[in-house]
Amino acid sequence: MDQELLKSVSRSFYLSLRFLPEAVREPLGLAYVLARASDTLADASTAPLAARLDALDAFRGALEFTASSSEWRTLAAQCASLPCEHVGEARLLTQIEPLLRVYHGLGAELRRELHAVLDTIIAGQRGDLVRFGYASENAPQALLTAGDTVAYTYAVAGCVGEFWTRVCAMQLPEFACRPVAELVELGRHFGQGLQLVNILRDLPADLRAGRCYLPLEELSAAGLSVADLLMHPERSRAVIGRWLAQAGAWLDEGAVYVEGIRGVRLRFSVALPRRLGQATLALLKQKPALESPMRLRVGRGTVFACMMSSLLEAKVFSNFSRNSPSTTVF
């Protein structure tokens, strides 16, 4: 895995991944960059909607076990034709063919796991495009029910928590000190919590793009329209507060997940995103994103503090002599 490529399209995940045991670092990193590539295709907002849908369909097809190298090249050409302003993501799209070559070179069992999670993610991205493809700030669209919001968090991130757990169980047989089935459920909710934090943080930008991931049924029950969220953000505090509480509950399951796995490196890789998620959640509780003039984001100092707290949580210091090679991550 090209570490510079990964670093250019990731922030917290890159920090976690480089600390992982080697046996899981490659498949988890590969899954991440492929998912990030499909997300980049979906977000190529200046490209026609039909072109983005076609690219996602081609991506999905290229992941099939029966896909040929000619299909990889066709996808690579489609990726090259789509506009991308982010330098790291633009470079990522130029690497689609070699990434697919690595993917198709995996063992069958690992490839099945990657295919399952990527297929779920791409299906969610495609559904998002169909739902919001023609939305705008003046003509916003919203998810209809709370169940739709929960389903979206699963398609984007909850499935990743399940995948992460299954890959670790496959590659690191002694990693679990709880039943794997229980860890799969905890991992699913943990991933959903991280995604829900992202949704709540990104509310202003999404609304200006015409996308609302808060359920319309809850807004209507509170006497709100989607437009009211930007025009009268203080009126949305009760609705947002319920989802902040849900995000906190799901992140708490991440703490149980950390306790249920073995290995300093693995525990750290899970503890860090949870603590970063909690830090972002704390900011959102202090000042809701809709009422802040700037995009809320944890600073470098907080990131460093989260890293140190995660090291302590993973018991790195108490295992220093036995795990000294892992301390070179910093």
Image (cartoon, rainbow, N blue to C red):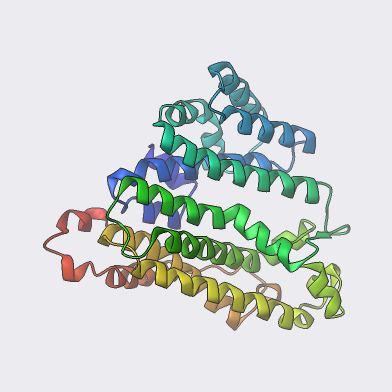
Residue at 62% x, 33% y: name it.
60
- Left or right of 248: which side holds 171? left
Residue at 36% x, 59% y: name it.
269
Position above or below: 116 against 246: above
The picture quadrant where one finds residue 238 is: bottom right
Residue at 65% x, 29% y: name it.
58
Quadrant (top left/top right/bottom left/bottom right) for the N terminus:
top left
Total numbered badges shown on the rendered structure: 0
Nearer the observer, 109 or 29? 109
Image location of residue 323, percent across then percent down: 17, 58
Image location of residue 288, percent across then percent down: 65, 77
Residue 87 visible in the snapshot: no
Q: In the current view of this chain or complex, which residue is farthest to the left? A: 321
Position above or below: 102 against 224: above
Image location of residue 108, percent across then percent down: 43, 31
Nearer the observer, 5 or 27? 27
Residue at 65% x, 74% y: name it.
243
Image location of residue 135, percent across then percent down: 83, 52
Nearer the observer, 72 or 263? 263
Q: In the current view of this chain or complex, which residue is farthest to the top? A: 70
Position above or below: 283 against 150: below
Residue 234 visible in the snapshot: yes
